Image (cartoon, rainbow, N blue to C red):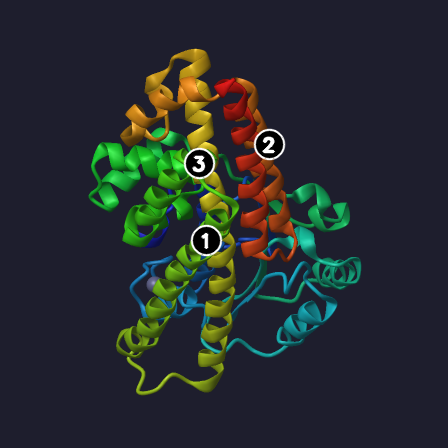
Amino acid sequence: MTDSTLWSDIIGQKDAIDKIISAIHSGEPGHAWLFTGPRGVGKWTTAKTMAAALNCEEGGCGRCLSCGKVLHEIHPDVFLIEPEGNFILVDQIRQLLQSIPLKNFEGRTKVIMIGEADRMTAEAANILLKTLEEPPQDVAFILVSSNPEAILPTIMSRCRMVQFKPLPANEMISFLANKYSLSYDEAILATKLSGGILGIAISFATSPIKKERRKMVLKVIQDIDRFDLAKLTFIAEDFVSEIKKSLNELKEKHKKEFAELKVQLNLGDIPVQAKRRIEQRQKRELSREEHQGFEEILNTLVSWYRDVILLKEAGRQDLLTNQDCILAIREHIDLLTSENVYECLQIIEETKQQLRFNVNMQLAFETMLFKIHDVLSVQNSYHSY
Ligand SMILES: [Zn+2]
């Protein structure tokens, strides 16, 4: 089973996977699971893999019709819910539970996956709890959360817990280098920029648009004290249009998905129900991508100022993220005081906090750039006296 493609695509989580596989092998996989651990280390991917394994003749081969449907999130016996907006609402859980008493359509086990399970409203959580207390047959619930403290203890006590660990950087680097044929330097850069989130590292490593975006952001930040406010407004606009570029890239990918699906799943046309589910997922992916684009630009800025401070205070060139900008970083260690660099990092951090709310990106970028500009141009005017 471990040789099959789906399990082998999950890296750095051997203990977690062994635990799940041996439970499946035992023939009594249990009716409720809770996968916890940091964001972006493979919990959701593992939940999907488990759903596939529970319904595949070969334990999650990744090639059969059933696995294909689970992966595209259109298997009639595998259900996924995630927060709509900020919360998982009681109606979402109700709708889901209503589908359980029906017999299985195609699979052997109905699987219900709940992403960000800590965001269930109290009402939603209580309804789920009632079901977990008297679980229907042949149903497996998989709850996923990077913030399990916020889940009802009574729900947690009903679940088998699987703890996912942060991904070791060296495993991520060699995975990226091997799987996407990157040079070692490219794999290191993608890993460092990802903040330990494999999906972000992969999307950076495989997207020319994101690589260009990083270069553009790094170039801008080096000259920011010399720009006037009008120029800074343009730059904020550029940041937003950079994010739109990767959204368009994703939209193209989504279009292709429908065409590929017809071939892969050998369908003349995609059934209406499946089509609707795919469209809903694609919509979620787009909103996540927009969110990530915003975060990635901020992370690039953070990486720049961190590099400056690292070289300035510790002299550690080997630890820098932006190894391809060492000359520019070196120039800036004399131009910036440590205090100002920390101030800039603080401003970026505050901008990041706004991600939790429905932020107007243009405005958020603009405000941030103005503030950074203020900090740095005040410093430069001191220097000139
Ligand atoms: Zn399969």
Q: Which residue lies most toward the top here?
A: 314
Marker disc for residue 226: 3
Give x and y (percent) for residue 29.
Answer: 53, 53
Q: Secondary structure at mark 1?
A: helix
Tell me if I can see residue 228 in this picture. Answer: yes
In the rendered structure, the answer to whether residue 242 lies left or right of residue 26 reads left
Give x and y (percent) for residue 27.
Answer: 49, 54
For badge 3, the amino acid type reads: Arg
Q: CA distance from mark 1 to mark 2?
A: 23 Å
Quadrant of the rendered image holding ligand 1: bottom left
Q: Is residue 149 above or below residue 50?
A: above
Q: Between residue 228 and residue 364, name the one nearer to us.
A: 228
Marker disc for residue 234: 1
Residue drawn at x 65%, y 67% as measured from the top left: 136
Tell me if I can see residue 15 in this picture. Answer: no
The reply to whether dot 2 and dot 3 touch (C-beta < 8 Å) is no
The reply to whether dot 1 and dot 3 touch (C-beta < 8 Å) is no
Q: Between residue 55 and residue 320, name the one nearer to us.
A: 320
> Label 2: which residue?
346
Residue drawn at x 46%, y 13% as measured from the top left: 313
Q: CA distance from mark 1 to mark 3?
A: 14 Å
Density class for disc 1 (Cα within 10 Å; few <14, some 14-19, many ≥20) is: few
Give x and y (percent) for residue 360.
Answer: 60, 57
Mark 1 or mark 2: name the one nearer the start of the chain: 1
Density class for disc 3 (Cα within 10 Å; few <14, some 14-19, many ≥20) is: few
For badge 2, the amino acid type reads: Gln
In the rendered structure, the answer to whether residue 85 lies left or right of residue 129 reads left
Residue drawn at x 37%, y 61% as measured from the top left: 245
Give x and y (percent) for residue 249.
Answer: 34, 63
Mark 2 or mark 3: name the one nearer the start of the chain: 3
Q: Between residue 194 and residue 303, name the one nearer to us.
A: 303
Count of numbered circles on the image? 3
